[in-house]
Amino acid sequence: MSYIPVIGLEIHAELLTQSKIFCSCSAEFGGEQNSRCCPGCSSMPGTLPVLNKTAVKYAIKAGLAMNCEINKFSVFDRKNYFYPDLPKAYQVSQLEFPLCINGYVPIHVDGKEKKIRLNRIHLEEDAGKLIHDDFNAVSLVDLNRGGIPLIEIVTEPDINSAEEAKAFVEQVSLLLQYTGVCSCKMEQGALRCDVNISLMKPEDTEFGTRVEIKNLNSLKSIGRAIEYEIKRQSRMLDNGERIIQETRRFNDNRGETKSMRNKEDAHDYRYFPDPDIPQVNLTDEDLEAIRAELPEMPDKRLERYINEYGLSETDAQIIVNQKLISDFYDETVKNYNNPISVSNFITVELLRRVNLGEVSMDNLPFSAKEFASLIEMADTDKVSKNDAKKILRLMVETGKSPEDIAKENGFLIVNDISKADEIISTVLAENAAVVEQYKNGETKVFGFLMGQCTKKLKGVCTPQVIKETLEAKLK
Ligand code: ADP
Ligand code: MG
Ligand code: ZN
């Protein structure tokens, strides 16, 4: 029997603030274990939290980017539970009055747009990390991550397939990157996803019982966990078994989910407002100031590239899909106003080098200005198209300017017309017999003559000039 999957996601995103949410410790990823914590974020009694304003601002930016309403009045609550990576035995989070509510994120799957509604985005603190040392049979705790600001983005159960779930996470990641509030490096745990999933029959009027799969940290495992869970629940329902509400863990190696524990309900956490943290009151001016800091978002850029610059939708999408590429593209066009040519050179030549792992966008050894001047040199026949590719490779390797590389390697075409004329005349004189053939109607020998001239005219003039001069002389 076939069922409709009903999926809601909870995405945790670490915010890129310099310091943690309630103390001044560094919020940077990594560091020697327990070197980035103080009495505050290691939960010593008697310490008091001071709310990081930037964390609040970043959460609001994320909310605005995802079309949320921003609550001007917002409260932090204690979510009580014990786990060794959380020595306070409560996590500061938001229950009744989160910073952002409602909102939606449009996704595109199979050429169709669908709006995934958001229930809320709230601000909370991350927990520490447990390191399980199986060899010595101990678990150790690293509190560097404890107190890093997190937002939790909670969707309505609007997602109906693994493809939609992945498209949603990709789109959220793109929006967070454009707003600059999260690195979105899933491999560093900066973006983590919980999947809630249940099945229903087409004729059902109520959702089925869901399970929650915790802490998925790649698009691939999100997709695989959903596919697995659809099969598992279908089989159970087909056999007349009941699904129990529980939390499951996905094992990447086995490609299976396994039960961790029965799922708690909100009331199990005994939430209550944190008496140590003042309520947040925002004014319209605060919100306007934050809105004004938002950059041009991906949908606007896409529109600009297609409508103003005339790029194809495919190329525009490739560029917009990574903020670093899009920023570099805009900067290059500022230096050389030929948007289509720049787009072609980026999507074909530069991305080839990036995909081969020779260079990465966050660490280019040349400026957009130098890159622009390379494309302009190729477009204006100062170097051949083929040599332009070689120059790019050398720019990646050496960081030298395209002009220097062209000079050093003899790639520059000087377009010395009189010299070209002279050399072509010599070539024709040396090949008098072939010229005779041509004049007798064997026009296919033109290619041979063209080849002979090109060999001798490297760097002197463009193929176009050679062709035109040859044609004129052979008349
Ligand atoms: P909790 O407080 O237990 O985490 P929420 O009501 O906040 O539960 O929902 C958490 C997530 O589960 C949301 O993304 C929501 O869309 C999703 N969800 C709720 N009910 C279902 C269901 N029956 N099937 C699939 N997902 C669901
Ligand atoms: Mg929840
Ligand atoms: Zn601290």
Image (tube, rainbow, N blue to C red):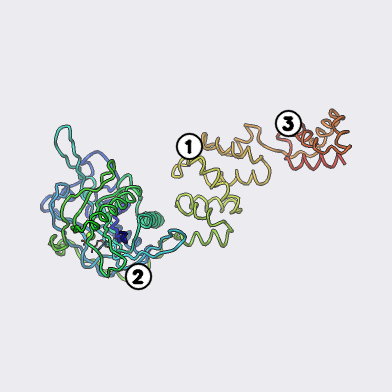
Q: In screen coordinates, is 3 left or right of 112?
A: left
Q: Position of residue 291 (x, y in %)?
A: 39, 65
Please give the count of numbered marks on the rendered protein: 3
Q: Which residue is mark 3?
A: 455
Q: Position of residue 50 (x, y in %)?
A: 21, 57
Mark closest to the chain's N terminus, 2 or 3:
2
Amino acid type, residue under disc 1 in the picture: Glu
Crowd tier of the residue under label 2, counting other residues whose Cα lies within 10 Å: few below 14, some 14–19, many 20 or above? few
Residue placed most toward the observer, 442 or 453: 442
Amino acid type, residue under disc 3 in the picture: Lys
Residue placed most toward the observer, 139 or 253: 253
Asked if disc 2 is less than 8 Å from ligand 3, the answer is no
The reply to whether discs 1 and 3 touch (Cβ–Cβ < 8 Å) is no
Mark closest to the chain's N terminus, 1 or 3:
1
Q: Is residue 14 visible?
A: no
Q: Quadrant of residue 116?
A: bottom left
Foreground label between 2 and 3: 3
Q: Is residue 451 visible?
A: yes
Under tag 3, what secondary structure?
helix
Name the residue rendered at 24%, 63% in the picture: 208
Amino acid type, residue under disc 2 in the picture: Glu
Residue 285: image tag: 2
Q: Position of residue 20 (x, y in %)?
A: 25, 52
Position above or below: 63 against 412? below
Under tag 2, what secondary structure?
helix
Q: Which residue is mark 1?
A: 358
Report the image quarter containing ligand 1. Answer: bottom left
| Alpha carbon separation for disc pair 1 and 2 | 46 Å
